């Protein structure tokens, strides 16, 4: 199969995956309400098939990430509720990083060369400016609450090395994994309540101030490093 035909087939598969996810309302499965309605069934299955269930869960997580589907936060919440906070933080960081690597691979293979050529002038200027503090800037990008696929597209355009991509992703998404894992833990307390549970009921928005503090500390470290280099 020629490279052009492979691109077409890959684009078609990704389009069909995203289209099916919404058209057939598969996205309704990835909601707190669905978990609440099927809570007893899920817990029974996991108690009887713990290792098989956790492997299946994270394999599904990886596949959904591979097809650029926006399910990261809800999957982390589900995992924390079903498998515990510490297990979720560790496995989610690994799986999301692998998903990110696969996204970058696909974006490089599928994106037309013209896009990279047009962006090359700007990306080279950005890379020159951030070169001395590359890891800090890449981690900070992960702290910014924008879709994962957009972050990966930016890193693809910047042609970030695989090592830098993996390290910055693992460190950058860690605070988010902790926040959403704590939300899953909170869900355990509320799951049996009769009233409907929303995302605002389980997430402590004060925790997001930690992300702001981390961004400030990164800016501060970059600023101090520049000052020291000048002296």
Image (cartoon, rainbow, N blue to C red):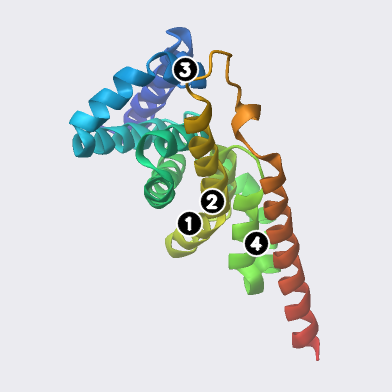
**Residue 159 appears in the rendering:** yes
Distance between mark 3 and mark 2 Cα atoms:
23 Å
Q: Position of residue 226 (x, y in %)?
A: 76, 79
Contact check, label 2 and label 1, Cβ < 8 Å? yes
Please name whichever residue, 44 or 154, is drawn nearer the observer in this view of the structure: 44
Number of residues whose C-alpha sits closer than 10 Å to that of mark 4, classed few (under 14), some (14–19) or many (20 or more): some
Q: Residue at x 73, y 53 (%)?
A: 212
Q: Is residue 202 above or below residue 99?
A: above
Please name whichever residue, 21 or 5, is drawn nearer the observer in this view of the structure: 21
In primary-sequence order, the first of circles 1 and 3 is 3
In primary-sequence order, the first of circles 3 and 4 is 3
Q: Position of residue 39 (x, y in %)?
A: 38, 20
Q: Residue at x 64, y 45 (%)?
A: 118
Q: Which residue is mark 4?
A: 137
> Circle 2 — which element?
helix
Distance between mark 3 and mark 4 Cα atoms:
33 Å
Distance between mark 4 and mark 1 Cα atoms:
14 Å
Q: Nearer the viewer, mark 3 or mark 4?
A: 3
Which label is found at residue 170?
Answer: 1
Contact check, label 3 and label 4, Cβ < 8 Å? no
Contact check, label 4 and label 2, Cβ < 8 Å? no
Count of marks placed on residues: 4
Please name whichever residue, 67 or 224, is drawn nearer the observer in this view of the structure: 224
> Circle 3 — which element?
helix
Q: Which residue is mark 2?
A: 173
Distance between mark 1 and mark 3 Cα atoms:
26 Å
In primary-sequence order, the first of circles 4 and 1 is 4
In primary-sequence order, the first of circles 4 and 2 is 4
Q: Which residue is mark 3?
A: 27
Number of residues whose C-alpha sits closer than 10 Å to that of mark 1, classed few (under 14), some (14–19) or many (20 or more): many
Q: Is residue 193 above or below residue 96?
A: above
Quadrant that contains the N terminus:
top left
């Amino acid at each position: 199969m020629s490279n052009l035909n492979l691109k077409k087939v890959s684009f078609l598969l990704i389009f069909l995956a995203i289209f099916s996810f919404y058209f057939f309302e598969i996205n309704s499965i990835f909601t707190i309400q669905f978990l609440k309605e099927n809570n007893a069934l899920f817990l029974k299955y996991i108690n009887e098939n713990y290792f098989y269930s956790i492997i299946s869960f994270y394999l599904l997580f990886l596949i959904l990430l591979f097809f650029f589907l926006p399910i990261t936060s809800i999957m982390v919440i589900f995992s924390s509720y079903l498998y515990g906070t510490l297990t979720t933080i560790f496995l989610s960081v690994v799986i999301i990083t692998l998903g990110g690597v696969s996204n970058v691979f696909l974006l490089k293979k599928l994106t037309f060369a013209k896009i990279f050529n047009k962006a090359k002038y700007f990306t080279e200027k950005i890379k020159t400016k951030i070169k001395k503090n590359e890891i800090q800037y890449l981690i900070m990008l992960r702290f910014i609450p924008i879709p994962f696929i957009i972050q990966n597209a930016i890193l693809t355009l910047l042609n970030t090395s695989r090592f830098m991509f993996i390290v910055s992703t693992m460190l950058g998404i860690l605070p988010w994994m902790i926040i959403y894992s704590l939300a899953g833990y909170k869900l355990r307390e509320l799951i049996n309540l009769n009233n409907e549970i929303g995302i605002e009921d389980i997430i402590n928005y004060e925790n997001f101030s930690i992300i702001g503090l981390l961004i400030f500390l990164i800016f501060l470290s970059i600023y101090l490093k520049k000052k020291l280099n000048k002296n």
